[in-house]
Image (cartoon, rainbow, N blue to C red):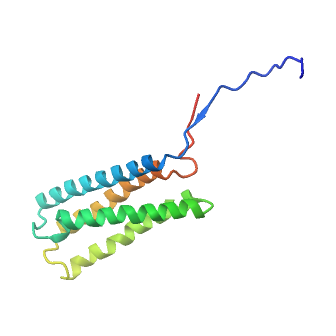
Amino acid sequence: MSTTPSSATPAPARSIRSAPSRAAASGWLIAGTVAAIVADALIALVSRAAGASDDFEPLQPGPYVTFTVLGVIIGAVGWAVIRRWTARPRTLLSWLVPAIVVISFVPDLLMLVSDYIPHADAAGIIGLLLMHVAVAALAVAAYHRALPLNGDAPKLTA
């Protein structure tokens, strides 16, 4: 035991917020999914008000709710895999997420030049494109909370 007085003052106690529990992570993913569905519903309403056909099936709740839920789940799995198995997940996701969103536009844009989905028009297609962006933005926000990347989660508090 040393009797020499120490001139250094101890650092203040800090707590580190760790990654959320499974229940909290699930809650964030559910909240992100619900927020994305609500955003889709609003976009569908605005699209129809802007002239999209009421008969354009992709703007009906059944299809957009189904595809939103599937998209958020598939995105969460991809996010978790990248988070776990890559050295720099933030760098990879910073270009991969926008690339996937742009690629997801292709089927919607093809509706403008084909008739495989009846009643497709510019207002409806623009609505679908906006839905892709809204779902991606809300899902990524939920992923950052549910499945934090390096730099997202430890928040130091004094």
Q: Residue at x 24, y 64 (%)?
A: 64
Q: Is residue 45 left or right of residue 23?
A: left
The image position of residue 139, as x and y in percent, is 38, 56
In which quadrant of the rendered image does the N terminus lie?
top right
Q: Is residue 45 left or right of residue 73?
A: left
Q: Is residue 4 above or below residue 157?
A: above
Judging depth in this view, the residue of 33 and 51 nearest the camera is 33
Q: Residue at x 44, y 53 (%)?
A: 143
* Tag count: 0
The image quarter containing residue 37 is bottom left
Q: Is residue 127 left or right of residue 137?
A: left
In which quadrant of the rendered image does the C terminus lie?
top right
Q: Is residue 71 left or right of residue 63?
A: right
Judging depth in this view, the residue of 63 and 123 nearest the camera is 63
The image position of residue 156, as x and y in percent, is 58, 35
The image quarter containing residue 52 is bottom left
The image position of residue 22, as x and y in percent, is 46, 50
The image position of residue 35, as x and y in percent, is 30, 51
Q: Residue at x 83, y 20 (%)?
A: 6
Q: Is residue 83 above or below residue 9?
A: below
Q: Residue at x 15, y 56 (%)?
A: 45
